[in-house]
Amino acid sequence: MRFVLLAVIALGLTACGEKEQVVVYKQGKYQGKPDNRSWDNAPLPAEWRGGEWKQGDRESWEDSVKHRQLSQNEYKRIGQ
Amino acid sequence: MARMKFLCDAERCIECNGCVTACKNENEVPWGVNRRRVVTLNDGVVGAEKSISVACMHCSDAPCMAVCPVDCFYRTDDGVVLHDKDLCIGCGYCFYACPFGAPQFPQAGAFGLRGKMDKCTFCAGGPEPDRSAAEFQKYGRNRLSEGKLPACAEMCSTKALLGGDGDVIADIYRERVLRRGRGADLWGWSSAYGVKPGAQPPVQQPATSGKS
């Protein structure tokens, strides 16, 4: 009886040593063609109503796009 | 550093489908492919109807990228998730992985063959020379390279759909919520699963007639 009890406890405890079976996420590596960056392009002529930035300058492009994003806020855009 | 995201204000969306039309028109998306669509909850229930415009959410930890067997996805410096159609094999894994149903597959043949995956590009084109004919044909317009925002967000008549840097559009939305005094509860666990009392509208019973 004692032997059976010990065997059951030992068998039960084996579960504690079980390794986690969660899949480890592995970031895929892009295999395709390289892409250009938006700020590497020249701005459009003014009549096309695009943004204005200095070609190749990320900060000025981001400022330009941010200005456009803020125009979505009509509390700021209308009546001020 | 910008992280481009969309945010749809369910209090404002009137289900006009202007965003869907703008996207279709701007990118000349083929028949049967919807990069963006408007989903309406509690359709027809007075006072409880809510609509949101859904497309690729350009996830920071995108499941489509994780499952792609040919690794055709990449993330731009602005946080836009794009893919290379020349590499895509149209397997459809990304469709199963995406919680928003963003990946679309055009019918490539008469026997229901799947074409290469197509999805919202945040109007940022793809891995072809910017503003080129090849880029337009495969991925649509590259408005970001023109210093513009996605056509759907810029076209939205009620400004329900906001597009841009996550921080900026979150600020715009926050200001709205503060002004109208409500709206932040539209999102989150309690509103989605009805934990909060009264969060879910009563189920409308079909009209009963005298006939059996």
Image (spheres, rainbow, N blue to C red):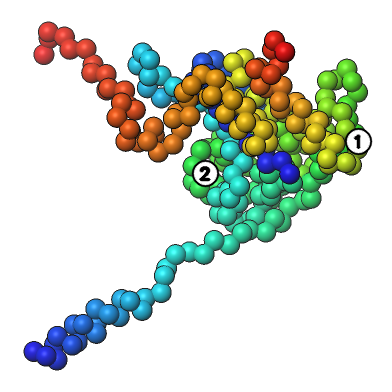
| Residue at far bottom of view | A3
Expressed as whole percent of the image width and height from the top left, the position of residue B26 reads 71, 24
| Any part of residue A1 in sight | yes
Q: Amino acid at mark 1?
A: Lys
Q: Label 1 marks which chain's residue?
A: A
Q: Amino acid at mark 2?
A: Cys
B71 horizontally vs A18: left or right? right
Q: Nearer the viewer, residue B63 or A55?
A: A55
Q: Residue shown at 71%/27% (left/top)?
A: A69
Mark 1–mark 2 Cα distance, whole angstroms, equals 37 Å
B4 horizontally vs B37: left or right? right
Q: Quadrant of the N terminus of chain B?
A: top right
Residue holding disc 1: A54
Expressed as whole percent of the image width and height from the top left, the position of residue B10 reads 49, 24
Number of residues whose C-alpha sits closer than 10 Å to that of mark 2, classed few (under 14), some (14–19) or many (20 or more): some
B49 horizontally vs B8: left or right? left
Residue holding disc 2: B98
Expressed as whole percent of the image width and height from the top left, the position of residue B68 reads 59, 53
Q: Nearer the viewer, residue B131 or B109?
A: B131
Q: Residue shown at 79%/46% (left/top)?
A: A35
Q: Quadrant of the C terminus of chain B?
A: top left
Q: Secondary structure at mark 2?
A: loop
Expressed as whole percent of the image width and height from the top left, the position of residue B14 reads 51, 16
Q: Residue shown at 41%/19% (left/top)?
A: B49
Number of residues whose C-alpha sits closer than 10 Å to that of mark 1, classed few (under 14), some (14–19) or many (20 or more): some
| Residue at far left of view | A1
B51 horizontally vs A29: left or right? left
Would you place residue B57 above or below residue B44 in this image? below
Single out the mark in the foreground, 1 or 2. 1
| Any part of residue B140 in sight | no
Q: Residue shown at 50%/48% (left/top)?
A: B97
Q: Label 2 marks which chain's residue?
A: B
